[in-house]
Image (spheres, rainbow, N blue to C red):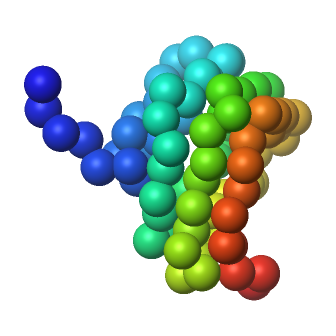
């Protein structure tokens, strides 16, 4: 198995052709994840996204985005 860092993992899942994304692990971020999709559901599956006090978690410019079943931890407000 090839290691995939957390930012690449979540970005790849969001940019897939699917309208539904289910996370399968906790995520640590140093940069915000851009969501440009329209009509996307992201289910955190109870996992935590931790920005370590360094960044916002998401930068959403798409429409009709649903974020559910997440634990968000230590993002900064910008």
**Left or right of residue 71: residue 66:** right
Q: In the image shown, does 61 or 78 lie closer to the viewer?
A: 78
* Number of on-image labels: 0
Please, is residue 58 above or below residue 21 in the view?
below
Residue 26 coordinates in the image, percent (x, y)? 50, 44
- Which residue is painted at 47% across and 63% down in the image? 29
Residue 1 coordinates in the image, percent (x, y)? 12, 25
Please, is residue 70 above or below residue 75 in the view?
above
**Residue pushed farthest right?**
64
**Residue pushed farthest left?**
1
Kindly tell me whether residue 45 is visible in this rendering: yes
**Left or right of residue 28: residue 64:** right
Residue 19 coordinates in the image, percent (x, y)? 67, 18
- Which residue is painted at 69% across and 33% down in the image? 46
- Which residue is painted at 73% across and 42% down in the image? 70
Please, is residue 29 above or below residue 37 in the view?
below
- Which residue is painted at 68% across and 64% down in the image? 73
**Left or right of residue 30: residue 71:** right
Quarter-of-image position of residue 68? top right
Quarter-of-image position of residue 53? bottom right
- Which image quadrant: the C terminus? bottom right
Kindly tell me whether residue 40 is visible in this rendering: no
Please, is residue 13 above or below residue 4 in the view?
above
Q: In the image shown, does 19 or 56 lie closer to the viewer?
A: 56
């Amino acid at each position: 198995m090839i290691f995939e860092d957390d930012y690449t993992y979540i970005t790849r899942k969001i940019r897939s052709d699917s309208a539904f994304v289910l996370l399968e692990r906790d995520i640590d971020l140093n940069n915000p994840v851009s969501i440009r999709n329209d009509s996307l559901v992201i289910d955190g599956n109870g996992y935590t996204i931790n920005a370590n006090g360094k960044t916002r978690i998401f930068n959403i410019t798409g429409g009709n985005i649903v974020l559910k079943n997440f634990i968000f931890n230590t993002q900064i407000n910008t």
